[in-house]
Image (cartoon, rainbow, N blue to C red):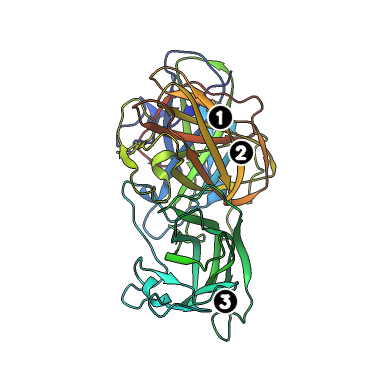
Amino acid sequence: MRNLLTLLVLLSLAGAAHAADFAWWKDELPYRVPVVVKTAGVEESDAPAQVRFNFSAFLPGGEQLDLHSVRVVEQDAESGAFLREYPALVQPVDNYFSGLAPLNFQKPYDPAKPPWIRASSENPANPALNLVQQSGLWEAGTPTPPWTLAIDLGEAKLINTALVLLGYDGGGRVLAKARLETATESADGLTDGNWELVGDWDQTSMFENGSWRPFCFAPREARYVRLVMEKMTGGVQPKVRAFQIFRPLYDPDNRQEARISWYLPGTWNGERSFFLYFDALRGQGQPAPPVPEQVAILREAEETLPVRSPAGVGFSPTYDKTASGPTDPNLLSYQYKDDAFIVPTAWAVTLPREGLYTLAMRIRGNPGDHQIAVLWDRKILFQGVFGLEGEDWNMIALQPQTLTAGVHTLELMIKKGNGPRPVDLDLIMLTTAPEFLPNQVLLAYPGAGEVRR
């Protein structure tokens, strides 16, 4: 049994006891932040940890973080003596969303100068211009595919997220096959150009009315973004209610916020003292460290993209002192009819290497069986049943899956099961650790940042 170690990042000025008196590990890393990790009174064994950290709070104005300089070091909680450096995975935040609290839409253009939108065909009653700056309705003007919608940003912009809200005619008639492409050059902004594929979907049967199709990808320069719709079920033309493009939270060349994860081998109980050491970017910066042998990537439920649950779903991000996460809200709660999938969450996930990954989640709800579908880049990765016991949090690990490296979109679709209780989702984790089945959530407390003078 392996236990989950969740670092609750409560940025405050209160540091670990005597942390400022601890010996400095390396003079060439002039910044550090203490992190105290505590167990919940039970032994932990080979536990993975992850913390999301805003480094800009500690760097002087104008300085950029050297992402490759970040080191995780354990020092003795009493003497401050160096104990060990841990191989760590350091990743900038994957997409522009900072979570549901707060949720800030950051579009890649001046709101006063909206982009142009073109369509291969349109119903005059529902033209493509209805989609500019708001959710409206576009309807293709012909039943013959392909149907294309294309956004022109006016000039090349850095983007990494697209959201598509589909229309729905009832009777299961939905868009069954489509692809998203970008280009920096195009003579007509619609068909001609150096188009490159960034994502697609094919026969996704989990569609719910009112849910968005999210596309997350590595940041790229693009002036044109098009959605090419190739197949509808039921022989009708498609309808789209929204087509939106977003930029990264931070420019990749100015990475100030990142997630740091590492594994703590061995069995222990109590309290341990860690430091994040780092430096500003100087010259070419430090070389990239190797990817750790075992990696763990955590996403809090409240960090979800706004995939918008179907009409009639009771959706409420909320706070619970037993849930993990540093924000208020720190979990998502869903209530819906028993026989329908809830479309609760979607995240951008960056995998550093190809491998066999286990998806684990911390969840509670009605006791008994619950159906689940996991979508990976809008295709079904796993579909099956998991069971919940009691009224408290359960840790569920699904069957390991082979996944490729790169930026991906992960979605969960869950049925609430029989009973009156909602489904509460706290967090998910992807890890390469074999036989991974966590069962605890632990706490950690960062202290005040320090600068070596």
Q: Secondary structure at mark 2?
A: strand
Q: Nearer the viewer, residue 96 or 162?
A: 162
Residue under label 1, please give it.
385
Query: Quarter-wise, where is residue 402 in the image?
Result: top right
Q: Is residue 370 visible?
A: yes
Taking the image as shown, residue 351 lies to the left or right of residue 223, namely right
Which residue is drawn at the image coordinates 61% and 26% (left, top)? 436
What amino acid is at disc 3? Thr
194 in relation to 200, above or below: below
Query: Which label was assigned to residue 382?
Result: 2
Report if the CB atoms under discs 2 and 1 are less than 8 Å apart. Answer: no
What amino acid is at disc 1? Val
**How many marks overall?**
3
Q: Nearer the viewer, residue 273 or 351?
A: 351
**Mark 2 surroundings: few (<14), some (14-19) or many (≥20) residues within 10 A:** some
- Position of the C terminus, as image quadrant, is top left
98 in relation to 11, above or below: below
Q: Is residue 22 visible?
A: no
Query: Which label was assigned to residue 404?
Result: none
Q: Give how far across and how far down residue 111 sits, in percent.
A: 33, 72
- Position of the N terminus, as image quadrant, is top right
Residue under label 3, please give it.
184
Q: Give the mark nearer the N terminus: 3 vs 2.
A: 3
Q: CA distance from mark 1 to mark 3?
A: 44 Å
Q: Give how far across and how far down residue 428 sits, in percent.
A: 49, 35
Q: Secondary structure at mark 1?
A: strand
Which residue is drawn at the image coordinates 42% and 38% (left, top)? 33
Which residue is drawn at the image coordinates 37% and 54% (left, top)? 60
Taking the image as shown, residue 335 lies to the left or right of residue 244, namely left
Taking the image as shown, residue 111 lies to the left or right of residue 382, namely left
